[in-house]
Amino acid sequence: GQQVMQIPQYQHVQEGEDFTTYCNSSTTLSNIQWYKQRPGGHPVFLIQLVKSGEVKKQKRLTFQFGEAKKNSSLHITATQTTDVGTYFCAGPWNYGQNFVFGPGTRLSVLP
Amino acid sequence: GAVVSQHPSWVICKSGTSVKIECRSLDFQATTMFWYRQFPKQSLMLMATSNEGSKATYEQGVEKDKFLINHASLTLSTLTVTSAHPEDSSFYICSAPLGSASYNEQFFGPGTRLTVL
C-alpha cells in the first residue's frame, strides 16, 4: 500500500537555527499540503503545492515539491519560539480516495 | 478563513455510554467532512469521510457500528461513539475542505477530547 514518511520525527533546535522537515511518499501525489499543530491545538493549514518542482515562500518558511511529486520539504530559516509545534504533510493518498496525514515532525525551539 | 466548530470541546463519560460529537461549518457549506482520531504525540488518523446525504466511508479497521456518522446537512456532521470504552479515549477532530474537491485546503475544528472512565 501507499506509505508516507516524515523525517525527522523530532527536532530540537536553538532559537535562530534553521530547521527542515522532509515528507516522502511511495507514490506520486497530485498535490501536497502542509499543516502546523501547536501543542494542545488543532492543525492549521500552511500551504498547498501542486506543480512539480514548485517552491513557495511564506516569510521564513520555504516549501518545496519534488520534481517527481513524491516528496516535499519545509524549511524554516532562523527559527523562533513561536515555530514550536508539529508539522504535518498531508495529501490525497490512496489515489485520491481519502486525505491522509504523515506522521509529523515535532519541533522544539530552545530560547 | 473558513471556520469549523466542534461541540463539546471535552467530555468525560462512563464506560458503556454513548457520546455524540458535533462538527459544524459555520460560514461555508461542506458536502464532505473528515473525522480523525489523534492519540497523544501521534499523527492524525483518518477514521471516516462523512458525505452529506449519503453513507459515510470508513477507513480500514474502523468499526462503522461503533462510530456512527451522520451528515444531516451541508453544515453539520455528527460522530457518535457508541458503548464507549477506555480505549476509545482520544482527541477527535473533524475537518472540512473549502470548495467541492475533497483534497482542497482543510479547515479543522478545535477538537473534542474524550475520556472514558
Image: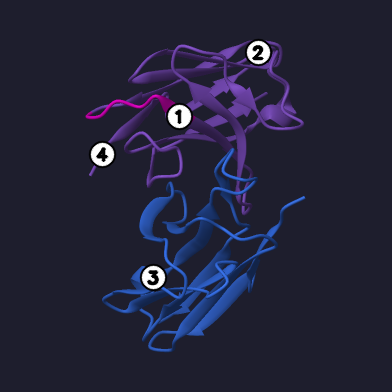
Type of amino acid at the residue the image marks with label 2: Thr
Type of amino acid at the residue the image marks with label 1: Met
Question: Could you confirm whether marks 1 and 3 are on the same chain?
Answer: no
The quadrant holding residue B90 is: top right
Disc 1 from disc 2: Cα separation: 20 Å
Disc 1 from disc 4: Cα separation: 13 Å
Q: Nearer the viewer, residue B55 or A36?
A: B55
In primary-sequence order, the first of circles 1 and 2 is 1
Q: Which mark is residue B82?
A: 2
Examine the rendered structure and indicate whether residue A60 appears above or below residue A41.
below
Residue ranking furthest to the bottom: A17
Question: Could you confirm whether marks 3 and 4 are on the same chain?
Answer: no
Q: Nearer the viewer, residue B47 or B51?
A: B51
Cβ atoms under marks 4 and 2 closer than 8 Å: no
Q: Which mark is residue B2?
A: 4
Say which residue label 1 marks. Answer: B33
- Residue at horizontal 72 percent and vertical 53 percent from the top: A2
Q: Which chain is purple?
A: B
